[in-house]
Amino acid sequence: MGAAWQIIRGGQVLDIDARHVGPADILIAGDTIHEIGAPGLAAPESAVEIDATDRLVMPGLVNAHTHGHGSLGKGLGDKWSLELLLNAAPWTSGGFTLEDKRLAAQLNAAEMVLKGCTAAYDMYFEFPTASTDGVQAIVEGYRDLGLRVTLAPMMADITLFRAIPGLLDALPDPLRHRAEAMATAPSEQHIAVCREILEGWAFDRDTARPALGPTIPLHCTDAFLTACRDLAAEHDTGIQMHLAESKVQAVAAQTRYGKTLAAHLDSLGILGPSFTGAHCVWLDDEDLRRMADQGASVAHNPGSNLRLGSGIARARAMREHGIPVGIGSDGSGSSDNQNMFEALRLAAFVSRTQRAQPEEWLGTWEVLDMATQGGARVLGLEDRIGRIAPDYKADLVFLDLTHVNYVPLNDAANQIVNCEDSSAVDSVMIGGRMVLQGGAFTDFDFDALRAKVAESVARLAERNADKHDVAEMMARYVSSHCVGLACHGS
Ligand SMILES: [Zn+2]
């Protein structure tokens, strides 16, 4: 039996490579784009026709950095720096049951689909370690929505309080004792469970790929990092880490390693084509050269970086060095949404604060490229997703050109970047299957999810109440110590 055929007719197609929007038909065989041609393109008689009149068809957006567990934590914080966010993590992300893990993944995936995203790199946190059943539930959560995912268990073998030089000593006695008693799982335990996960990976790697996520260099011993490096090489998987996200981390690296974070990772042999640094706000020129030389990529998260006051990553300079750059939303605990249209617009806008010459700003076609093919490269799927081209997966977003965002329709590409807020997303196809049609999920009950999420967060709030209170007590000391550290390093 041959593949099922579908033909999309009557739409305007966004061709990012050609920097062109124009009428075209798209013939799909099974989950893959077969041919793109002028209106009236020949199709097999059996092909199911999809009417795309008044629709702009674009490649699905690819989120290069998110955290599925964070979906339950949107809106919890206000004036949080990264370190305050990490201080709050035990109550915002702790105590998840297996069902909570699945729900959070479903919620994250649902928001991405609703907002035109079809694939994501998720650093998902389970405490104290990842687990085989947890990973199974998380991947199934994504698959329930049809979203492609590269899933990296987020791990640390050093606590926040030990990772930041001087922080323990900055706490008053009772709090210091509490902080000293906090523990992570040891390196060997993380590695053992990750090995089990990788060896048992039963999902099709086009739809769900495994990766490793030792979270932050300072939060990981060198022995743990090199063990992750070796395990990733053994199983041909990616590694994603938060790299030089905050100034505190950049300053602490000098104290701890006597060199930059990127130089330290390079000396351990971690940087390479399957490595992605998320954020990379505080990299110097030498670091950028290092990343480029090793073929490493970057996940640029401008919304999160603004939200947490982390700074602005030098995406233009990264691209000048030849570093592949994708765009991410970051987790909803820090951004607080999964809106890739917002993320790509912010990527364009923040670049304009860094260079005086408008021709050096990130423009429409560049950010569209970063949010599609750039992300695909980060996920390790650059030969399969991110483009509307033959042999690429049929991951497509249909924007409603009658929506106010496109009235009048002056320049569709500029309007995607400068006007679109995801409210004109009409339909989303992933692997040839419509997962969202006319704004509604085709095969997922969002109302049921909403009810279960409400129950979960109520239970988690009760369960994590003590952790909330401890984090609140710690917050002012964490904040003042970290601010002092960052100022001292300037
Ligand atoms: Zn992150």
Image (cartoon, rainbow, N blue to C red):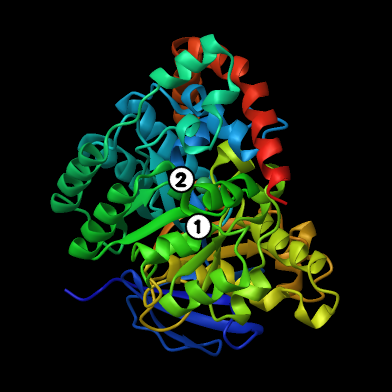
Disc 1 C-beta below 8 A from ligand 1:
no
Tell me what residue is drawn at x 42 percent, y 46 percent: 215
76 relative to 407 in the view: left or right: left
- Which residue is pictured at 65% across the width and 31% down the height? 481
The N terminus lies in which quarter of the figure? bottom left
Task: Give the image location of residue 28, x and y in percent.
Answer: 38, 76
Are circles 1 and 2 on residues that touch, CB within 8 Å?
A: yes
- Residue identifier under label 2: 218
Which picture quadrant has residue 136?
Answer: top left
Residue 150: where, in percent of width, then height?
A: 36, 56
- Residue 472 position, x and y percent, is 61, 17
The residue lying toward the viewer, choosing from 353 and 413, is 353
Identify the disc placed on residue 390. Answer: none
- Few, some or many residues within 10 Å of mark 1 (<14, 14–19, 20+): many
Q: Position of residue 170 (x, y in %)?
A: 60, 24
Which residue: 60% across, 77% down? 319
- Determine whether 86 is above or below 270 in the image: above
Q: Quadrant of residue 190?
A: top left
Q: Amino acid at mark 2?
A: Leu
- The crowding category of the residue bearing disc 2, from other C-alpha atoms within 10 Å (few below 14, some 14 to 19, many at least 20), is many
> Between disc 1 and disc 2, whose residue precedes?
2
Q: Secondary structure at mark 1?
A: helix
Give the CA distance from mark 1 to mark 2: 8 Å
Q: Is mark 2 within 8 Å of ligand 1?
A: no
Residue kind at label 1, given as amino acid type: Leu
To which quarter of the image does residue 349 belong? bottom right
Q: Which residue is mark 1?
A: 261
Q: Who is closer to the viewer here, 11 or 279?
A: 279
Mark yes or no: residue 207 visible. Answer: yes
Up/down of 13 relative to 261, above or below:
below
